[in-house]
Amino acid sequence: GPDGNPPRLDARLVVIDTSALPEGSTALSLMMAIFATYLTNRWATTPGFKTLVLEEAYSATNLDAVPLVLRELVKRARGVGASVVSVFHHISDIPADSPLRSIIQEAQVAHIFAQDQPNDARDVVEIFRLPGSLVETVQSLPKGVHIYVRGKLPTTIVQGFRTPLEEWFTDTDEQMRGDDDDV
Protein backbone atom coordinates (compact mmCIF):
# COMPACT_ATOMS: atom_id res chain seq x y z
CA GLY A 1 0.00 0.00 0.00
CA PRO A 2 1.03 3.65 -0.26
CA ASP A 3 1.96 3.78 3.44
CA GLY A 4 4.21 0.70 3.25
CA ASN A 5 1.58 -1.58 4.80
CA PRO A 6 -0.11 -4.42 2.93
CA PRO A 7 -2.80 -3.07 0.57
CA ARG A 8 -6.40 -3.15 1.80
CA LEU A 9 -8.41 -4.72 -1.00
CA ASP A 10 -11.57 -4.35 1.11
CA ALA A 11 -11.28 -0.56 1.38
CA ARG A 12 -14.10 1.68 0.10
CA LEU A 13 -11.85 2.86 -2.74
CA VAL A 14 -9.43 0.47 -4.37
CA VAL A 15 -7.21 1.83 -7.14
CA ILE A 16 -5.10 -0.61 -9.10
CA ASP A 17 -2.37 1.47 -10.73
CA THR A 18 -1.26 -0.28 -13.89
CA SER A 19 0.60 2.72 -15.30
CA ALA A 20 3.95 0.90 -15.07
CA LEU A 21 2.72 -1.77 -17.49
CA PRO A 22 3.23 -1.10 -21.20
CA GLU A 23 0.09 0.18 -22.94
CA GLY A 24 -1.50 -2.51 -25.05
CA SER A 25 0.58 -5.26 -23.45
CA THR A 26 -0.46 -8.81 -22.60
CA ALA A 27 0.51 -8.07 -18.98
CA LEU A 28 -1.94 -5.15 -18.83
CA SER A 29 -4.74 -7.30 -20.28
CA LEU A 30 -4.04 -10.04 -17.78
CA MET A 31 -3.93 -7.67 -14.80
CA MET A 32 -7.24 -6.08 -15.84
CA ALA A 33 -8.88 -9.52 -15.94
CA ILE A 34 -7.40 -10.66 -12.63
CA PHE A 35 -8.30 -7.55 -10.63
CA ALA A 36 -11.74 -7.16 -12.21
CA THR A 37 -12.51 -10.81 -11.42
CA TYR A 38 -11.17 -10.50 -7.86
CA LEU A 39 -13.12 -7.33 -7.10
CA THR A 40 -16.36 -8.59 -8.62
CA ASN A 41 -16.16 -11.82 -6.61
CA ARG A 42 -15.24 -9.93 -3.44
CA TRP A 43 -18.22 -7.64 -3.96
CA ALA A 44 -20.61 -10.59 -4.20
CA THR A 45 -20.72 -10.61 -0.38
CA THR A 46 -20.26 -6.88 0.18
CA PRO A 47 -23.43 -4.83 0.69
CA GLY A 48 -23.89 -1.47 -1.00
CA PHE A 49 -23.33 0.06 -4.40
CA LYS A 50 -20.06 -0.62 -6.19
CA THR A 51 -18.48 0.74 -9.38
CA LEU A 52 -15.72 -0.93 -11.36
CA VAL A 53 -13.94 1.40 -13.79
CA LEU A 54 -12.07 -0.21 -16.66
CA GLU A 55 -10.00 2.69 -17.92
CA GLU A 56 -8.39 2.04 -21.28
CA ALA A 57 -10.65 -1.00 -21.66
CA TYR A 58 -9.52 -1.45 -25.26
CA SER A 59 -6.19 -2.73 -23.86
CA ALA A 60 -7.94 -5.96 -22.95
CA THR A 61 -7.87 -7.14 -26.58
CA ASN A 62 -4.27 -8.34 -26.38
CA LEU A 63 -4.97 -11.65 -24.68
CA ASP A 64 -7.73 -13.70 -26.30
CA ALA A 65 -9.49 -14.85 -23.11
CA VAL A 66 -9.58 -11.43 -21.42
CA PRO A 67 -12.40 -9.89 -23.49
CA LEU A 68 -14.50 -12.98 -22.72
CA VAL A 69 -13.77 -12.67 -19.00
CA LEU A 70 -14.62 -8.97 -18.95
CA ARG A 71 -17.84 -9.48 -20.91
CA GLU A 72 -18.99 -12.11 -18.39
CA LEU A 73 -18.06 -9.86 -15.46
CA VAL A 74 -20.05 -6.98 -16.95
CA LYS A 75 -23.06 -9.26 -17.41
CA ARG A 76 -22.83 -10.51 -13.81
CA ALA A 77 -21.96 -7.21 -12.13
CA ARG A 78 -25.56 -6.16 -11.74
CA GLY A 79 -26.23 -9.30 -9.72
CA VAL A 80 -23.75 -8.15 -7.07
CA GLY A 81 -24.97 -4.55 -7.10
CA ALA A 82 -22.11 -3.23 -9.19
CA SER A 83 -21.86 -0.94 -12.18
CA VAL A 84 -19.08 -1.27 -14.72
CA VAL A 85 -17.73 1.82 -16.44
CA SER A 86 -15.67 0.95 -19.51
CA VAL A 87 -13.64 3.58 -21.32
CA PHE A 88 -13.02 3.11 -25.03
CA HIS A 89 -11.35 5.96 -26.89
CA HIS A 90 -11.76 4.61 -30.41
CA ILE A 91 -14.14 1.85 -31.40
CA SER A 92 -11.74 0.96 -34.21
CA ASP A 93 -9.35 -0.27 -31.49
CA ILE A 94 -11.77 -3.14 -30.86
CA PRO A 95 -11.93 -5.90 -33.48
CA ALA A 96 -15.47 -6.36 -34.86
CA ASP A 97 -15.62 -9.95 -33.56
CA SER A 98 -14.28 -9.16 -30.07
CA PRO A 99 -16.51 -9.79 -27.03
CA LEU A 100 -15.58 -6.25 -25.97
CA ARG A 101 -17.92 -5.00 -28.70
CA SER A 102 -20.85 -6.43 -26.74
CA ILE A 103 -19.79 -4.41 -23.69
CA ILE A 104 -20.13 -1.28 -25.82
CA GLN A 105 -23.33 -2.37 -27.57
CA GLU A 106 -25.10 -3.37 -24.37
CA ALA A 107 -24.15 -0.26 -22.40
CA GLN A 108 -27.12 1.29 -20.65
CA VAL A 109 -25.44 4.70 -20.54
CA ALA A 110 -22.95 6.12 -23.01
CA HIS A 111 -21.06 9.40 -23.10
CA ILE A 112 -19.85 9.90 -26.66
CA PHE A 113 -17.11 12.47 -27.09
CA ALA A 114 -15.63 13.79 -30.33
CA GLN A 115 -14.17 11.22 -32.70
CA ASP A 116 -11.62 12.57 -35.16
CA GLN A 117 -11.67 9.56 -37.46
CA PRO A 118 -14.70 9.26 -39.76
CA ASN A 119 -14.80 5.46 -39.31
CA ASP A 120 -14.96 5.85 -35.51
CA ALA A 121 -17.76 8.42 -35.82
CA ARG A 122 -19.74 6.13 -38.15
CA ASP A 123 -19.16 3.10 -35.90
CA VAL A 124 -20.31 4.86 -32.74
CA VAL A 125 -23.46 6.17 -34.47
CA GLU A 126 -24.19 2.68 -35.79
CA ILE A 127 -23.50 0.83 -32.53
CA PHE A 128 -25.81 3.09 -30.53
CA ARG A 129 -28.42 3.21 -33.30
CA LEU A 130 -28.26 6.98 -33.53
CA PRO A 131 -29.52 8.96 -36.52
CA GLY A 132 -26.98 8.98 -39.35
CA SER A 133 -27.08 12.77 -39.29
CA LEU A 134 -25.07 12.66 -36.04
CA VAL A 135 -21.90 11.35 -37.73
CA GLU A 136 -20.76 14.90 -38.53
CA THR A 137 -21.82 16.08 -35.07
CA VAL A 138 -19.70 13.36 -33.41
CA GLN A 139 -16.70 14.53 -35.44
CA SER A 140 -17.16 18.18 -34.55
CA LEU A 141 -18.02 18.11 -30.84
CA PRO A 142 -15.99 20.77 -29.00
CA LYS A 143 -14.04 20.05 -25.82
CA GLY A 144 -16.39 19.51 -22.88
CA VAL A 145 -19.39 18.60 -25.05
CA HIS A 146 -20.64 15.07 -25.54
CA ILE A 147 -23.64 13.09 -26.71
CA TYR A 148 -25.44 11.40 -23.82
CA VAL A 149 -27.26 8.15 -24.56
CA ARG A 150 -29.33 6.50 -21.83
CA GLY A 151 -31.46 3.52 -22.70
CA LYS A 152 -34.54 4.49 -24.67
CA LEU A 153 -34.54 8.10 -23.50
CA PRO A 154 -33.98 10.79 -26.12
CA THR A 155 -30.34 11.34 -27.07
CA THR A 156 -29.05 14.59 -25.61
CA ILE A 157 -26.07 16.83 -26.32
CA VAL A 158 -24.48 17.86 -23.02
CA GLN A 159 -22.11 20.72 -22.20
CA GLY A 160 -19.93 19.84 -19.23
CA PHE A 161 -18.33 22.46 -17.02
CA ARG A 162 -16.19 22.70 -13.91
CA THR A 163 -16.37 25.25 -11.14
CA PRO A 164 -13.18 27.22 -10.41
CA LEU A 165 -12.58 24.97 -7.39
CA GLU A 166 -12.93 21.83 -9.54
CA GLU A 167 -10.58 23.30 -12.14
CA TRP A 168 -7.97 23.97 -9.46
CA PHE A 169 -8.44 20.56 -7.86
CA THR A 170 -8.27 18.56 -11.10
CA ASP A 171 -5.59 20.54 -12.94
CA THR A 172 -2.68 18.14 -13.16
CA ASP A 173 -0.94 19.84 -16.09
CA GLU A 174 1.86 21.31 -13.97
CA GLN A 175 2.58 17.95 -12.36
CA MET A 176 2.53 16.17 -15.74
CA ARG A 177 5.02 18.66 -17.18
CA GLY A 178 7.09 18.73 -14.00
CA ASP A 179 6.57 22.51 -13.72
CA ASP A 180 5.65 22.47 -10.05
CA ASP A 181 8.64 22.00 -7.72
CA ASP A 182 6.35 21.64 -4.69
CA VAL A 183 5.05 18.24 -5.75
Image: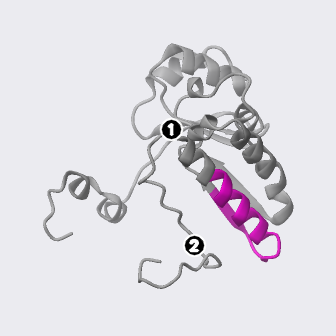
Report which quarter residue 156 is drawn in. top right
Q: Which residues are magenta?
A: 32-52
**Quadrant of res 119:** top right
Left or right, 108 with reference to 17: right
The image shows residue 22 at horizontal and vertical percentages of: 44, 44
Residue 44 disc label: none
Q: Residue beneath label 2, please?
A: 13
Magenta span has 44?
yes
Q: Going from the N terminus, do you reach mark 2 or mark 1 first?
A: 2
- The residue labelled by disc 1 is 24
Q: Residues within 10 Å of mark 1 (few under 14, many from 20)?
A: some
Query: At 59% from the left edge and 19% from the top edge, which residue is drawn?
Result: 134
Question: Type of residue at label 1?
Answer: Gly
Q: Secondary structure at mark 1?
A: loop
Pick whichever, 31 or 122, lies toward us. 31
Give the residue drawn at x 41%, y 54%.
Answer: 20
- Residue 89 percent across, percent down from the top left: 52, 34
Q: Amino acid at mark 2?
A: Leu
Indicate the quadrant containing the C terminus: top left, top right, bottom left or bottom right: bottom left
Q: Residue at x 62, y 28 (%)?
A: 94
* Cα–Cα gap, marks 2 and 1: 25 Å
